[in-house]
Image (tube, rainbow, N blue to C red):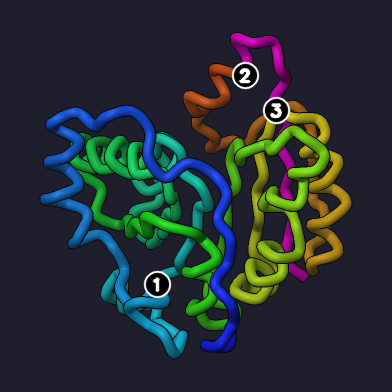
Amino acid sequence: MTSPDQPRRNFYGRIRGKTLRASQKTYLNEDLGALQPSDITREENPDRRPIDPAAIFGDARDVWLEVGFGGGEHLVHMAARNPDVGIIGCEPFINGVAMLLGKIRDAGVTNLSVHPGDARDLMDVLPDASIAKAFLNYPDPWPKKRHHRRRFVTPEHLLPLARVMKPGAEFRVATDIRDYVRQTLKEVPKAGFDLVGQGAEPWEDWLSTRYEQKALREGREPHYLTFRRR
């Protein structure tokens, strides 16, 4: 658990993009409230009391986590394939959140929860060993060397992630940036994970995202890494 007197963190990255369409504003106004877990932010939960992930989904099912779900394609795909699992998606970019909400409506999935903010705030209040699987798909590469500390694969993010993951839980990373692969292979094991496999072949249940398709069009090769929590 994070101390309630911990200084507020810097957040790097976009919160908003181009103007939302009318339909996307409707999704945010009508759907987000029911899908958003409570007591995550410091404003809601200044004492950083642990939440009960089972209460989010109404039962004791396994809970998975996707960090930075982009447009939500993979998140909805995994929810549809695994209806007995509850999946929490974190994404601070409100345009991506609106895109996801539209996909949820279209797919009719009911086992998703959406935190429209920093994943660190969620991990602060998750109990130890409460997440059974986690996904990090095409994270912001922060290509400049001086910005590499902003990447997700740093101790600031990985140590809290390791704390909330169950022993033996799987952590998947997909990226098209070679230096991100390098840093992932260096930092993730130090945080408490073992490398299970890596390479150019995706997972059997993988759904290619719009970010991956953009990478392929621009000639970059996807790389998939699988780790297991010790």
Indicate which disc, 2 or 1, sits on the residue closer to the N terminus. 1
- The quadrant holding residue 141 is top right
| Position of residue 120 in the picture relative to residue 82 (left or right) | right
Badge 2 or badge 3: first in the primary sequence? 3
Residue 41 - label: 1
Checking the image for residue 215, the label placed there is 2
Q: Nearer the viewer, mark 2 or mark 1?
A: 1
Which dot marks residue 176?
Answer: 3
* Cα–Cα span, label 2 and label 1: 33 Å
Examine the rendered structure and indicate whether residue 194 appears above or below residue 139: below
* Amino acid type assigned to the residue bearing label 2 in the image: Ala
Which residue occupies 69% across, 38% down? 142
Left or right of 188, for residue 13: left
Indicate the secondary structure of the residue bearing disc 1. loop
Front residue of 27 and 73: 27
Which residue is painted at 78% across and 63% down in the image?
Answer: 193
From the viewer's perspective, tell me whether residue 82 is left or right of residue 165: left
14 over 133 or under it: above or below: above
Q: Mark number for residue 90?
A: none
Q: Where does the magenta region start and end? A: 216-230
In the image, what residue type sits under mark 1? Thr
Amino acid type indicated by mark 3: Asp
Q: Position of residue 207 (x, y in %)?
A: 50, 31
Quick check: marks 2 and 3 in contact, CB under 8 Å?
A: yes
| Picture coordinates of residue 75, whole percent (x, y) | 42, 44
Q: Can you tell which of label 1 and label 3 is closer to the viewer? A: 1
Q: Residue at x 70, y 65 (%)?
A: 156
